[in-house]
Image (tube, rainbow, N blue to C red):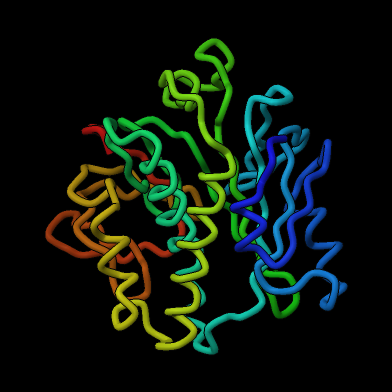
Amino acid sequence: MVELSRTRSIAARVEVVAEAASTNTMLRELAADADGWPHLSVLLTDNQTAGRGRLDRQWTAPPGAAVAVSVLLRRLPEVAEARGWIPLAAGLAMADAVADQVAEHSVSVKWPNDVLVDGRKISGILAEVTGDAVIVGSGINTAMTAAQLPIPTATSFASLGVEVEIDRLLARYLRSLERAVDGLAETGDAVTSGLHAAVTARCGTLGQDVRVLLPGERVLEGTADSLDPEGRLVVSANGEHHAVSAGDVVHVRPTGG
């Protein structure tokens, strides 16, 4: 792993491990030591062997081809509804960090928090509660070749012809994530803090025809119109508006976002 001087200047603690089954799982165990692992502590590896994504999906990559980073958040909004915005804040922060290094490409957030470049996934986010803290895990496809990409709708910095600056990426991500979470904690409201508007502007799902796989194997098809104040995706279908809080979203006609 490269020198992480920028990242270390922002994070309260940075630990790089040679290998981890799951950085989220490892950090959850370490987080029991509140003094040793304060707010904005970071654990990362470029060899995660049993990563997990949303809906319990497995996330794996060849050693050295991707970076898995987990961030411990202890200074949280008191309002429970505001905490629901943390995964969206992380997706926005990562999208901004990715866009910083691929300026000639279109970078967007697929609701709720996948990061897409030209409509293809380069990063995913998984936020998990542990005690009175939240762990935000991110996987970023860095050096993965086109042949190593797990699915046709994935991409990586390498396949885009970009040699990513890991320290710059992580520092930008952490700074943006910290700012967003602090704003939520101070205002208790994503609209007042400006996070709602920022996520809306970066969300490539809005305006798309979508198919949403809901709990209980239900399917909702319609147009993604907006995000409500709680961060739910509002889908118009058959003349009605449906606020989706959890579901797997498929862009029916991707348009680069």
Where residue 44 appears, as percent x and y from the top left, is 72, 46
254 horizontally vs 217: left or right: left
Q: Which residue appears farthest toward the top when viewing the image?
A: 147
Where residue 190 appears, as percent x and y from the top left, is 36, 77
Residue drawn at point x = 21 percent, y = 44 percent: 208
Seen from the viewer's position, the closer of residues 151 and 218 is 151
Quarter of the image where one finds residue 150: top right
* Marker count (numbered): 0
The quadrant in which the C terminus is found is top left
Where residue 89 appears, as percent x and y from the top left, is 44, 63
Residue drawn at point x = 55 percent, y = 31 percent: 141
Seen from the viewer's position, the closer of residues 244 and 102 is 102
**Is residue 11 shown above or below 74?**
above
Residue drawn at point x = 19 percent, y = 54 percent: 237
The quadrant in which the N terminus is found is top right
Residue drawn at point x = 28 percent, y = 43 percent: 210
Seen from the viewer's position, the closer of residues 197 and 96 is 96
237 horizontally vs 103: left or right: left
Where residue 83 appears, as percent x and y from the top left, is 51, 76
63 horizontally vs 173: left or right: right
